[in-house]
Structure formats: C-alpha cells, structure tokens
Amino acid sequence: MIEGSLAELQANALARIEAARNPEELEAVRVEVLGRKGSLAAVSKDMGKIPAEERARIGKLLNSAKQTLETALAARQEEFAGQALGARLESEWLDLTLPAPGIRPGSLHPVTQIQEEIEDLFRSLGFTVLDGREVEDEYHNFDALNIPADHPARDMQDTFWLDGGNLLRTHTSPVQVRGMETLPLPLRMIAPGRVFRNESVDASHEHTFYQLEGMMIDRDISVANLIYFMKTLLTAVFRREVTVRLRPGFFPFVEPGFELDIQCLICGGPGCPVCKQSGWVELLPCGLINPRVLRMSGIDPDKWNGFAFGLGLTRLVMMRYAIDDIRHLMGGDLRFLRQF
Amino acid sequence: MKFSYNWIREMVDGLAVEARDLERLITIRTAESEGVEEYGAKGACRARVLAVEPIPESHNVKAIVETEQYGTKTVVCGAPNCRAGIETIYVPLGKKKIAGVESDGMLASAEEAGINRDHSAIVEMAVEQVFTPTDSIIEIDNKSLTHRPDLWGHYGMAREVAAITGGTLTDPVDVSLLPAGDAVIRVASDDPELCPRFSALVFENITVAPSPLWLQFRLSAIGLNPINNIVDMTNYIMSELAQPMHAYDRALLNGDTLTARPARDGERVTALNHEEYALTPANLVIADARGPVGIAGVIGGLDSAISERTTSIVLEAANFNAASVRKTSSALKIRTDASMRFEKAQDPENTTRALARAIALMREVCPGARLAGGVADWKREMPAPPKVRLKLDWLARKLGRPVPAEEVRAILVRLGFGVSDDFEVTVPSWRATKDVSVADDLVEEVGRMIGYDSIEPKPPAVLSTVPPDFPERTYYRRARGMLASQGFTEVHNYSFLSEEQAAQMGFDPAALVHVLNPIAANQSVMRPSLIPGIYANLVENRKHLDSFRLFEIGREIHRRDQGLPEEVPHLAAALYGEESGLLELKRVAEALAAEVRVRPAEARGFEHPRRTAEVLAGGAVVGRLFELHPSFIEGRAAILDLDLRLLQPHERRASKYVPLRRYPSSGFDLTVLAPTRELVGELQDKMAALAGPLLERIEYVGQYQKSDSKSVTFRFTVGAADRTLSSDEVGAVRLGIIEGMRRLGYELTV
Ligand SMILES: [Zn+2]
C-alpha cells in the first residue's frame, strides 16, 4: 500500500519538476516534495507504522525515490542556470566592428624604420653604429677622404657651403674618418645619417637625404670578403637571395673602387623598364679602403686594410615602397607618413 | 663622353664584338656606360646615282641608284644636285608615290644624314672619302672617367677595348711625321708647374673650308658641331687622343713668341665665345708680344681666331696643371671640352703625338697646307715613369683569389704597363699623372680584367667582438618608439629655414649659421630650433586633419665664434586639436625621463602667455612645453621641445631594488582651499613637505572650481618599513599637515 503511494508520489513529483517553468516554480516543488515538511518527509514519518520485516525494503525504496527526485531537481536547476547564463550572454551582444577607442599608434618615418633595420643587422655582425656631425669642415668631408681641393671628384658632389668656411656633409664618410681617428683597431662601424647635396628638388632629386656608410678594418680583408658582406646585407634587406655584381667605380676613398649592382628584382635579369633593360640595378658604391685614407687617419696600411661601402637609405625606402616622388619623404604630410 | 663604335673599331684590329655587347663589357671592366644609340639616318647606306630621268610637270627627278646594302632602287628626288655619277646616301623608307612615280626610299641631305645642318641638297661624297653613314654611339658616364685622363679620347678607350677583347691595338699616331729642324716660332712657359709642356707647329698655305663629310659626320655623331677644317681637325684630335689643341691665325699674332704665363692684374681677353673676361694672376694665359691671346687650357681668344681669311696657323698642343685649369674654369664660369680634359690631369707626353697626328690629318682636311719649320717644344724635365712593385701573394690576399703570374702579366701589358720578370711594374705616362701610383691601384687593373664575378664571396676570418655601444643612440631609438606608440608620427624636416621663419620664432637672423649658396632664398639659414619646421607641419596638416600628433628628432645648429657650429639633438612633439594637448605632452616628457617637472615660464612671442612652461629634469631646464599663440594658428597646438643631450642622463632606469613593504600602509584624503591660480604642483610640494618621513606618496585626486577660489583634494599614503602605523601615528601625520597648511594661510575642509 505504501509502496504504491510512494511510486505515485515520485511519478507525480517528477512530472512537476519537468513542468516547472522557472527556478521559482522548481523551488516550490522542491519545498513541497523534499522539504522538511514535504511529502517525502511525511512518508518517512509513517515508517514507524510499517512492519519491521518490511521496513528495510521500504526504507531503501524511500531513499531511492529521494535520490531520483534530487537528481532530477539538480538537473532541472542546472538547466535553468544554463538558460539564465545563455540569456545573459545573449543580452550582452556587442558590436565588435565598432572602432576601438583611444589613441591610434603613430608611426616612425620610413627612413628611420629601414635605418633601424639595417643598424640591427650590422650590430648583429659586430659593427658599431656611429653618429656624426651634420656640419663638417673641409678636412673631414674631403681631404681626409683623399679628395684634395683641386680634385675633380669635388665636382661630383655639389656642396652646401656655410659661413665660417664649414660645409654640410655631402656623405657620412666624415663620421668614418672620425671613427678611424678615435676607435681601437680592428674596427667595424656604420654611420647612418642625413646628408646634403646642393641640387634642385624634383620628383627624383632631393638636397637632403639619408645614407648609411660602413667600413671594416682588420688584418686581412679582401674583395671576396667585401662581396660576402654585401651579399649578406642585401639578402637581409630585400628578404630574398640577391645576385650581385661588382664593376669598376671611381671613389677616391677606396682603391679599387666598385659600383655594386644587384640583379633586377623585378624582371630577374632579362631586362625591364625598372632596370632600363639591362637586368641590373646600381645599388651601392664600395671598395677596399684607399691606403692613403688609412694613413691620413693614422692607420698603417701595411698592417691593416679594410673595405668601405655606402648605401642610400632614401633610395632603399623608395625601392621598397615603390615611392615615385622623393619629396614626400621630407614633406611632413601625415597622410603619407602614417602609411608606414 | 660619347664614343663612336666605328672609330674604336678602326683602332682595334679584329674587333668582333657588337656595339651593344661592347657597351656591357666596358661597363663591367672599365667605366659605366649610359647606353648605346644608333647614329645617322635609320638604315642609311652609301649609294651611287646610276641614272636620272626627269618627271614631267615636276621639279623632281626619278633616280636609279645602286645602294651598298639594298641593291638597285628607284627613288624620286627633288634635290637640285641629284645627277648621275654622284656618291650619296640612301635611306630605306618604304615605297610611296611622289609626283605619280613610285619612290622606294630617299636620298639624304647632310642634315638628314646627321653630318651637318645643310639641307639644301643631297649629300655628295668625294669619291676618295666615301664613308659608312651610320654609327653606334656608346655614351660613358663622365663621372666614371674622372680618374682616367686617357679615356677622354677614343684611343684610350680603344686600348681598353683591345685589352678586354684580346684585339690588337693600332696607334693612329705616326710620330715619325714630326719635322726635324728649328721651329719658326718660339714657345715658353713661365711656370713649369702650371704649364709643364708647350708644343706648337706652324702650317702655311692654309685654305679654310668645310671639313670632309666623313669628319663632319664623326664629330656630329659624338655631339660636336663641325665648324671648318682647321677647328674640326683640332676637335677630332682632342676626341681621339684626349689632347686639347688650339689653332691661332698666325697673321693675327703679335711677334713670334707664345708664352704660358699667369695673367697680369687688369689684363682682359675676349674669348671665342665673344665674352670678355677680366683676368687675375690666378689665371694662366697664353700671351703674345701684346698680351693674352687665350686662357690656357680653357678657351682661345677671339682676336687671333681662325677665319676664312686665315692662311697660316700656329697649332698649339700644350699641357696644363689640372688644378689651375679647374680653378680658372670655375672662377670664370667657362667649361669647355678642353678644360674638362685638362682638369683630369692629361699626359704631357701627348702634346707632340697630337702634332704628329695633325700633320697626317692636315693632308686630308687641307691638302694644300705646308709645314713651316720644325716643332717648337718647351718642356720641363719630365719625371721618370713611376715603378710599382707588385707582389702576387699580396695581390691574391687583396682580391681573395690567386691569379696566375702569366695572366697578371698579360693583363698589365695589354693595358700598356711595363712588367719586369720580378713584377716591377712601370706605369705608362698616360696613367701616371693622377691615376696609378701604388700597388693598390694595380689590384684594380687586374681585378677588373679577370672579372670580379670570378671571385667567390668569403666570410672574413676575424674575431667575434661585441661592438661598443653609444647610450644616446639607444635612447633616441627608445624615445622614437615611445612617441610612436603614443600616437605621434615621425616627420623629417629640412635643416634649412628662411630668415623670416627664424625671425618669426624670435631668432636674430644675423646670429644664425648662413648657407653661402642656398638652393632657394627660403632655405638660407640653418635651423636653430626644430619649432619653425614643426609649425609648418602643423599649418599644413591642419588643412586635412582635425586632430593629429607628430614629432621630430633632429639637430639644432647654433653658431659658435670659432670652429664648427654646435649641433644639439632635440625632440619636438606637437599635438593639435580642439582641446589642449599640453598635459598629454607633459606625460610624454615624464615618460622620457625620471623626475620631470614643469614650471610656468615667461612666454615668447609665439607662445600662449598663460600656457607656457619650462620643463625641468634633475632641477635643470631641459626644454619647454607650450601652446602656440592663437594668432599663429586656429585650434590648439601644444608643443613640447626637449634638449635630448640634457635629458638623456635623466633617462629612467632603476639602480637598486627597494624591498616591498611588509606592513600595510594607511591612507587619507585632504582637501585644501586655494586661490584659483595657485599651482597644484606647489600645493602638493608644500603638503608633502609637511607630511614628514612617514609619507609614502601623495596623489592629486581632483579639484573643484569655485567663483574666486578652488578646492583641491589630495590622497596621502603613509606607512613605515618596520611596523604597521597606529591610528594615532596616522592621525598625527594628518594633523601635522592640516596645522602646517593653516599656518601657511590655507584652509582645509576636513
Ligand atoms: Zn628588370
């Protein structure tokens, strides 16, 4: 008899748990069935009336019913909690296509970026990075580089002259002269910076641009070493294997002097408008340091020798980003500069 | 410098390389070529007019011509001189009807053929001087010839070509033509340094006339204008041997002596270009008995110029000091083909070679001319040809690969060097003036001829070392990165300003470093501040953007009484918008160095008088923070200007760790009433001083503006390293501040 009512109670309660529409209704069912004064409690109170031989069996049944109901209740509670969380999450919909608040990062000048990149590369190869003066004297800009006053090479570089007999450096080589004068041997250094040539400004000419020159002086430096360094440098700069060639070039600072060309990165050699159909693009002057230059800086050319090179940072920037008007670089227009 | 392929080929026997390939070889082995251009009418060739028939009712005739390349052709020709038997130039143009007759190509005038400017008739070549009317012109970049005086003539280039291709070089000069015996004129040099050699020759029975067409064509092809046979001949020899020459009308010279000497003060000369030049002793001249007849190595004088009336000439072939010619040429602003060559230090041995060449050429260009007397030749003692010892193992170390002894020898010999058995190398005169003097120079000669592509790249065997570091560079880089991350975009501005720009920012233009040869009047002084450039950036960018941030790191250039100007690295950052960016910029300054303070300062003309401060680090002024005066710009432009040299030593860096507090701190707020323009920074300093040693930190919380005063709230955090403060101790600190402030006359809302 008690068995039957227990089964009915369980079935009934399960149905109500299932039917509860919200956590409040569910709680009401719990209190009604499992609460201290609930229907199950009422059943257990009647346990005393049950014959002793039946008591253990009914007790088990009672426990099982309680467990079944508690499990069902917990599952249903969880279901409601899940629904509530789901509803909250749903209500928290956010439009992530909205613009991010706060300050947009600015950007470094493209010349600075390429300069830092190449500085890092050379530092990893053991080179010191030197800063120099923008205003120089004739000695350091010309004479110490084996370009005496009557040398026609001075014609190659249109110089800005300043009062007081000074000039604006036409290359960063004077920094190297000062480096040779002060740094211990052997030495490896680069000198990036702003240089000046007195020429009219148009889409492809600037009187103010950036260069990076470098040199390495050691006991036994050869043309083969120079080619190795230049190839390593350019492969890193262009982020791909480059083919280089040296051909004679005249720079009083070096002997022998070279123009270094790279195989055209656009056409790969057969010729195109960028390389003027030659398959090669002139990239940088370099050479073995002229023994006269070493001697002038107090270095014994019988014991030491080295190579030197110059790289046009402005030109590299223009190549890398396909910039067709050099004037943008010194123009200060943020619409241009923010692109980098 | 333009080189004629045909001309070079005449001097290199067996040259089988085409112009386009030769150009590439020259570029890789010798000097940079700028390209090859075909010269002459396209497809032109020699032709002979076989027969001519009139065309009814036309001034044209129908000519049957036998062409050198295209067989027999019929062309319609309107030239008055078109007649059977003449040697002329045929140009294939395709067929078309003229005057009802089909014409297949045309006969060219001298202008059409590229010989000279004559277009009145078709070309008539003298039978004994027929020539190929096309050529390939290889243009070599002059800069790459700066150190090679010999390459300013075709013969020098032919020597290179012969060395590169293995062809045989033929010298166009036959020195045995030089007449022996006494000269009929005298030449002299007053300054053996400036004129080491002066050679001359006299020709009589001269008829001045146009040059033969082949010579005119050749000069035109390399960009020189044909003038007359005598002038053309000198230009031809200059283009061939790199030796500039000058021809004087002997009848117009005074006396029989030509002297190279410094000009006397006040002397003047009217040059061939019809300009008159006032000379100084810095200019070397050629003078006759009366005065200057030419500016040595630069340009001849008009008074003794060759004309149709000339019957006798003095032909000068001299050698002049490169620096002297260069100075005179740039001082007088005359650049000529002669001065360009002398500036490169020409070979003194070349003067009489040029005269010998003239004797041969004169037979062609002026057949009646007669030599008068022997060669007049003044020269100082010529130095012996320099000798250079070349060690082959040293050469191999320099190049990074060995070169067999016989190959080295062959290369040097082909280039004109003498090589002894033990590699003592004699430098030829044409390479000795400036170019080759030490063994390193020979590395280049061998290297370029074996080809640098034959050298395998090799890493050098050197010690690994950590390069010395310069903290200021690292600092600038960090500063740049920090500014960019805070929204500032880097600009690069010119180092030049106009005087007006400088004056506008309060600089006295007279005190600035001036550019003596500015590119434009508005770029005539060196910037003593980055602000004018930044101001220009603000004005320009405001046209496109409502708000923006930018910065520059660059040098200020300041005049010093002596020596080089002072260069001071500065950082200038600007923030433009509707709201003031001053405090944002202050935060930037604080991020760049520790202990940055600002202090209100007297404004300069372009600064907002109530929004200007000095920036201090470690107690010293390191820069300024200000808003631009509203009369300078619409909207608010805040600017931070820092001297990086002064700022860098204050860069933030921790030196020693401070142990974390083990005992909790306590905090309380205090609000002080102060006059509206009392500085919060000063209030804070005063209260911090009153708080005593238990103060951990003081923070500004906010302020509330009243009609004639303000209330400012600060939060105090107090504590001790060795204990938790009791509430009595905290209260005592608080009371100390309140009472202290009251003594100073402030009220506090407690
Ligand atoms: Zn290409």
Image (tube, coloured by chain):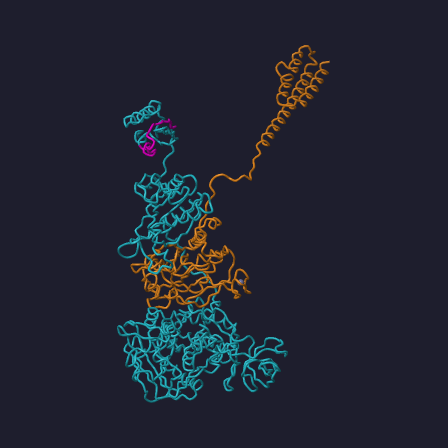
Chain colours: A orange, B cyan
Taking A294 as reference, is B365 left or right? right
Expressed as whole percent of the image width and height from the top left, the position of residue B231 reads 41, 80
A260 on left or right of B329: right
Relative to B489, residue A156 above or below: below
The residue nearer to you, when weighing B167 against B622, is B622
Is B681 colored magenta in this rendering?
Answer: yes
- Boundaries of the magenta span: B664-685
Does B731 appear above or below B369? above
Magenta stretch: includes residue B442: no
Image position of B654 (left or right of B53):
left
The reply to whether residue B716 is visible in this rendering is no
Q: Horizontal and vertical percent for residue B264?
A: 26, 74
Name the residue at the front extreme.
Answer: B57
Percent across and percent down for residue A236 are: 48, 56
Which corner quadrant holds the C terminus of chain B? Answer: top left
Residue nearer the viewer, A145 or B264: B264
